[in-house]
Image (cartoon, rainbow, N blue to C red):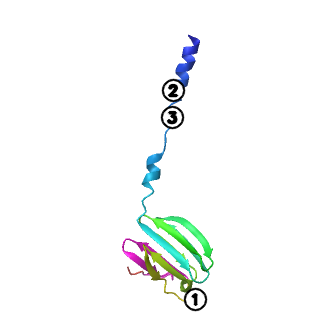
Amino acid sequence: NEGNENNEKSDVTTHSFRRAVPPTSAKAIFPMKLVIRATETSWISVQADGETVSQETLIAPAHASVRATREIVARIGNAAGITFLWNGREIPAGGAEAEAKTFVFDANGMRAVTSAPSPAQNQ
């Protein structure tokens, strides 16, 4: 009888093992892809869907790839030395030498965000 009681107690904890397949497959869909290519050495900081995914110095001709579902924000330390490949389309950053710029990529495309603090921002 005592052996049966021990088996019943251990049976309660043996069924806590599950495989986490759905979360992994749900994260596999990223409709947005950005490749940041350095033609000159430049510091970058990149956020994908609100999470920082990269903070590094790209030494030309290096590149960094980022995928996201909603939005990618790229802060560039040398805008003259960077080009973007946004969902397969080449876009120049269009900045001056050593100019720091912030770019936002989303469903509407790319837009540059001015980093200078201003009391009234028009959007």
User: For the view shown, which residue lies furthest in the bottom direction?
Assistant: 96
Whether residue 88 sits left or right of residue 41 in the image: it is left
* Nearer the observer, 90 or 13: 90
Q: Are marks 3 and 2 in contact (CB under 8 Å)?
A: no
Identified by mark 3, the residue type is Ser
Q: Which residues are magenta?
A: 100-120
- Which residue is rendered at x = 43% and y = 74% of the image? 88
Identified by mark 2, the residue type is Val
Please identify the quadrant where the N terminus is shown: top right
Mark number displayed over residue 12: 2
Answer with mark 3 or mark 1, whichever residue precedes in sequence.
3
Image coords of residue 44 (percent x, y) = 57, 75
Q: Find out whether residue 94 is within the magenta segment.
A: no
Identified by mark 1, the residue type is Glu
Locate residue 2: give its quadrant. Answer: top right
Q: How many marks?
A: 3
Image coords of residue 86 (percent x, y) = 44, 75
